[in-house]
Image: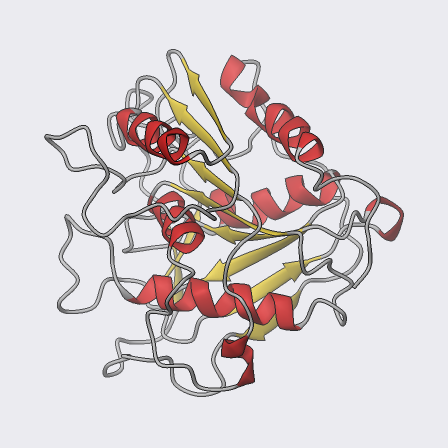
Amino acid sequence: MVWPIFAADAPLVVEIWPGQAPDEIGHIGAERFRMSPALERKQVEVTEPTRMITDVTKPTLTIYRPAKEKDTGTAVLICPGGGYWNLYWQLEGEEVATWLNTIGVTGIVLKYRVPRRPGEPEREPARRPLQDAQRAVSLVRSKAGEWRINPQRIGIIGFSAGGHLAVATATSFEKRTYEPIDDVDKISCRPDFAIPVYSGYLKPKDKDELAPGLRIPTNTPPVFLVHGGDDIVSPPEHSVVMYLALKKVGIPAELHIYANTTHDFGVRKSERPYATWTEACARWLQDQGFLNSPTRP
């Protein structure tokens, strides 16, 4: 069961880069939709196929505004998962934006570059999506007045590989991963909070420590972590290690691990306990001051 629609208007689509994205290489074919494979319950919670996007060379933002009477002024950049090969656009993009609209938050789906390009090995995070995400945070902040968003209430949520991208964006804001190209890149790319959900790539396979390339600055924003206890795609230790690392640095963090729960549950409604994570997250956002009456820029 999916969430009812509480959107204001048809979504706006905006390109992230003014020209070709940095480090983009030759043409990889036309962007296209495809269906995800049907999987077994021991692998994922949503087993039926859903729509994915792949062959992305022109990253975009798709902005879903909540109904005006519900709008809190908070916005969340949404990073769908897909192993840095595809984007689970329906389950971890559009449906997430719809849920965010129900709690008065603008949902902004980030279409970042997939699949992996040459030199981006499968067992490591791809490099170019972080460029897209850093640019996206700055672009949203630059448009805060136009889009009726509070520039100090811009968060990021991600699922699976997108959860890693959310963490990387929330901890790598001190230095951009590309050469600045215009005034947008002079605006902070630090999200105000992060929500990584069943994330991968946060720890090495055989060690309980942060993955190489991840570090946690002392001004990392608050983080809300979610995972399934029986996840065999991205084991829950990824979120546990990240939670402990955040606490060690003194970053406000909350961790929810749901028993008998696997991967890919998104925000879909269910009678299972894991489906209550969206309620817990909304309460956390409220407690952090992100769902109070908006202060317009």
Name the spot of residue 149 as percent of width and height, x first: 73, 60
Q: Is residue 183 above or below residue 128?
A: below
Between 264 and 135, the one lying in front of the other is: 135
Quadrant in which the N terminus appears: top right
The foreground one among 284 and 99 is: 284
Quadrant for residue 152, please give it. Answer: bottom right
| Residue at the spot 82% in from the left edge and 50% down from the top edge | 67
Give the x, y percent position of residue 289: 71, 38
| Above or below for 267 versus 31 | above
184 sits to left or right of 217: right
Residue at 29% x, 76% y is 29
Image quarter of the C terminus: bottom right
Residue in front for this viewpoint, 185 or 268 = 185
Q: As displayed, is residue 248 above or below residue 57?
A: above
Would residue 250 be found to the left or right of residue 94 on screen? Answer: left
Residue 244 x %, y %: 34, 27
Tell me which colouring the rendered structure shows. Answer: secondary structure
